[in-house]
Image: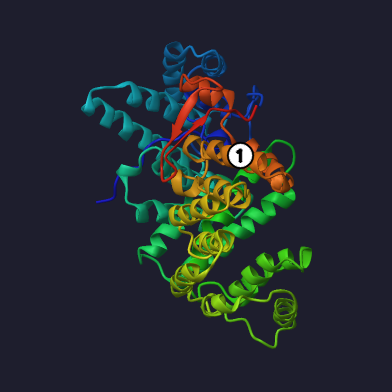
Amino acid sequence: MMKKYIPFYLFLLLAFGACTPKTAQVIQEEDQVSTTEETDENLSPCKNFEDAFDPDDTRSNYIIYKDYIEFENYEEAFELWNKVYKEAPAADGKRNDVFTDGVFFYERLALGSEDSIMKAQYIARIFSLYEEAASCYPETASSIKGQKAFDLFFKYPDMASKFEIYQLFKEALDEDQSTKQYFVLNPFTSLLVDVYNEGQISKEEALEMSELVQSILKEGLETCSGKSCESWKIIEGYVPQRLEAFETIKGFYDCEYYINKYYSEFLEDSTNCEVIQTLYIRLSWAECATEDTRYQRLVSAANDLCVEDKELKVAYNLLKEGAFKKAIDAFIEAEVLEETEEDKSKVNFIISKIYYAHLKNFPLARKYALKAAKLRPNWGEPYLLIGRLYASSGPLCGPGTGWDSQIVVWPALDKWNYAKKIDPSVSKEANKLIGQYARFMPSKEDLFFRTLQNGQSFRVGCWIQENTKIRTSD
């Protein structure tokens, strides 16, 4: 039996984590309500103002309850909403906001009810309002599916399985692949990785959906303007990063994927051995053709610039072959043979980067970065890496947006600030990372609704488990 889908606010603001009643109210378009009879064939077939017993009175109630919502006078707003809903659920025949306002009201009732039976009734009412909205405005059906899935993912994950929510998102995207569906990209991408790893979808479907969300993201970034670009920037900070999980699966992405994504790093810094070796490993993992001129250029740079220690040759060869776990074992064995603590530190840092870049195992990456830092005091690089681990943990510690995914930036900033404090040589890179990620911190409004204060001590959970200081992006 299909599980019931539960409410959600309209996507414009909620798509990125807003969940308070106050935020939910500013989602409606402030178009003028029509005061003349419409003959447009595109009007909804459901009852509109002109079908009401008293059209003028119904229009007036519509305008007034909207004002009441804005000023948080919810009880009187709900009373007038009921009158409008009875007489003209389709409003002026061009918008479905009477239905979605009803969702808002019943969600408030459900959240505030301690009676499980009443709560279930409110939830059922919400579900029926969405069905009515889709029926009266078929052109919005795909968006409504996306909104249902969005709310199930963020607010009611126990009401449906991951696969059911994934399927609902997929249906929404199948029906409408435009940038209007931007609000589904983050949660859908998260589920896409999960359901593939759990064996519930094929590689072909996962690859197809991966390419789809990336194409929508690309179009959104290229065509956005004004404040809407802020939303696309948030998606850009999550979707590609979450999809990197597929890079740990051999054969999932082809050679061209890695070339397109990472080769520019080599072109920008073609004498950096770390960049050269990391890209070489990726292209080897992707089984790129050795006759590819780009691959040959990389190999040539590696041979000319990156001479490996004999003691580490076996480990490096395993790394180039993509045998990451065997390479780590070899590096651990080689570390014992290193004579100086500085060399031991370098080996541990290499292990840390393998766990980070290739195996996506953040806890173990941190473990070896800290070991490297302990062996070589006043070296900032390990702390830069740990900061990157923390800042990249939004998909691991939350849905990619909202509070749980934002607070990981705080301990990341701590590590970057510490890195430049002990090692001035990394200051430029540390400042770059701080500037890049500081805008993703929670806002003052986020703190207000959680009764928290700027500068207050706070413990970040998830795998990070560190005390930090609260900061805001504004």
Q: Which residue is mark 1?
A: 418
Viewer-closest of 263 and 313: 313
Question: What's the residue at 56%, 22% (across, down)?
Answer: 454
Residue 363 percent coordinates (x, y): 44, 53
Which of 324 and 136 lies nearest the eye of the viewer? 324
| Depth check, front residue: 75 or 320 | 320
How far across and how far down the image is residue 104, in percent?
Answer: 44, 27
Asked if residue 15 can be seen in this view, the reply is no
Left or right position of 236 against 46: right
Q: Is residue 416 left or right of residue 301?
A: left
Q: Is residue 114 left or right of residue 90?
A: left
Left or right of 76? Residue 241 is: right
| 320 lies above or below 212 | below
Q: Tell me where residue 146 appears, x and y as whole percent.
A: 48, 47
Q: Position of residue 428 (x, y in %)?
A: 74, 46
Q: Does residue 155 appear in the picture of this structure?
A: yes
- Other residues around mark 1 within 10 Å, as few (<14) / some (14–19) / many (≥20): some
Q: Amino acid at mark 1?
A: Tyr
Secondary structure beneath disc 1? helix
